[in-house]
Amino acid sequence: MKDRINRLQRPLAAATRPRGALLPMLAACVVCAACGDGGRTATDQDPSVWTTEAEYQLGDPFETGVAFEAPLVRIDPGRNRVLVADASTAQISAWTPDGALLSLRGRMGEGLGRFGGAGGLFVEEDGTMSVMDWSGSRFAYFAADGEHTRTQLGPGTSLKYEGLSIVLAPPRDGVYLGRAVVPPAMEAAAGPFATDGPVQREPLLRVRRSETGEWLDAEPLLWLDISNRVMVAEFPDGSGSYGGQRFADHDQVRFEPGAAIVMRTKGGPGSVELIEVNSAGDTVWHRRLQLEPREVTPQMLDEVLEERLDVFAPFRAEGLTRQEVRDIYYEALYKPEYLPAAEGRPIPTSSGEIWFRTHEVEGDLRVHYAVRRGDMDEPPRRVLLPEWLRLSDATETHVWGVRRDEEEAPQVVGRRLVPVS
C-alpha cells in the first residue's frame, strides 16, 4: 500500500511510458502550462458574443409515455435527431427536434440490450450509438434505427492500476481510454491514509487486449493534477465530512471513443488549456486561452461557508457552536486568490467545438466559451446560457441540454443560438 501511494505521489512531470519515448514529451507539454502560446488568447481575439432563445422541449410524458429522470443528450446532425439516454432507466430514445418520439430502446438489466444505468452516450457519424454503464465496464451498441446490435464487456474489477479501480470509455479500434480512480480518503490523506500524505495526481490510461484476448496491463498516457479537488472537514470527535471544493482547480477530462479531452486551469489567473490526446498517446491538439481573471472575494467565501453550515451544522451542534463548525469548514476550504477560469468538464459537441462553463455570470445568464476543436487561431465564441441549463451538446444553430427544477422532472430542451455581436 505504501509503495503504491508513493508512486501516485511522484511529481506530476514524472510520468513514464512502458513503451516508446513519446510520453515524456507529452507529460512535459501537459504539465507546463506556459510551454507555448498555443495560439492567441481569447482576450486578444475579441470573441463573438451569442445568446439563445427558447425553441424546443422534448418529452411530454402524458403524450409519449416517456419521463426523463437523469437524461444524457447527444445530437445526430446527419439525421436531424436528438438522442437521449436516461441514466436511471437505461432507456435510449430518439426524437425529432420538435418533440416527436422516433424510437425507444433499452432497459435496466443483464440481458441483450440492457445495462445497469447509462454513464455515457456516444454517437458516430453514421448514426450508430454506444452507451456505457456507470462502471465503464459494459458497452451496449445500437444501430442507427435504435436496434440493439451487441454488448461488449470491459475488464470489470479484474483489472486495476496500482490497486485502483479503472473506469473506461468505449473502445476505438480495440483501444480503451480511461482513468484510475483515486478514492477521496486517499486523495485527502484522511482516515486510514492519514499518515501517507495526500495523493495529487490520477493517471489517464490506455488499456488493450493481447492477441489471445487477455487484458494487458494498463498504460499511463499522462497524469491529471487532482490537487484541491476534495474538501475534508475534520471534527474534534475524530469524524470527518467529505465534499468537493467549491473553487477547485483540478484537471478535468472528458472521454470519447479513441480520444480524451483534458482541461487545465492551473496555468495562472484566467488561464484555460485544452489538450486532446488520442489512443496512441499522441497530443493532437493543445490550445491555451487567456480569459479575464476574477478574484475570489470574501463574500464568495462567506456564501460557500453559509451553504455548508445550513446543511451540516445541525448534525454537528452537539458540543460545538455554529462559529466553531464554521471555523472548521473555513480551514478545510480551498481559498485561491483567483477563481479557476473554467468549471466542470469540457464538452465535445456535434458542432466540432469544445465548450466549457465559467464562473462568470451576467444577470441570470452563465458565460460559456466554445472553441473550435483542433484549431489554433479561430476566435472562440462567448455564449450566454440560462443559469438553469446544463449543456450537453451543440450544433451550429442550437444548444441542447437539460433543465433541472427542484419541483419538476428534468426537461430536455433545445435553444436557438442568436448572435449579439
Image (tube, helix red, strand yellow):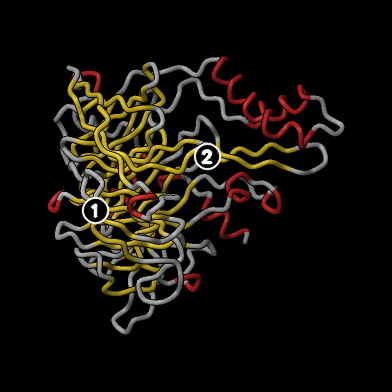
Q: Which residue is mark 2?
A: 229
- Mark 2 residue type: Arg
In percent of the image, x 36 and y 22: which residue is there? 365
Can you say which quadrant of the picture contains the C terminus? top left
Q: Earlier in the sequence, mark 2 or mark 1?
A: 2
Q: Quadrant of residue 416?
A: top left
Q: Farthest residue toward the right?
A: 319
The answer for how far apart the CA atoms under marks 2 and 1 are is 27 Å
* Image position of 41 (left or right of 212): left
* Image position of 127 (left or right of 323): left
Residue 303: percent from the left, percent from the top?
58, 21
Q: Secondary structure at mark 1?
A: loop
**Is residue 244 shown above or below 146?**
above
- Mark 1 residue type: Asp
Residue 288: percent from the left, percent from the top?
27, 32
* Image position of 13 (left or right of 354): right
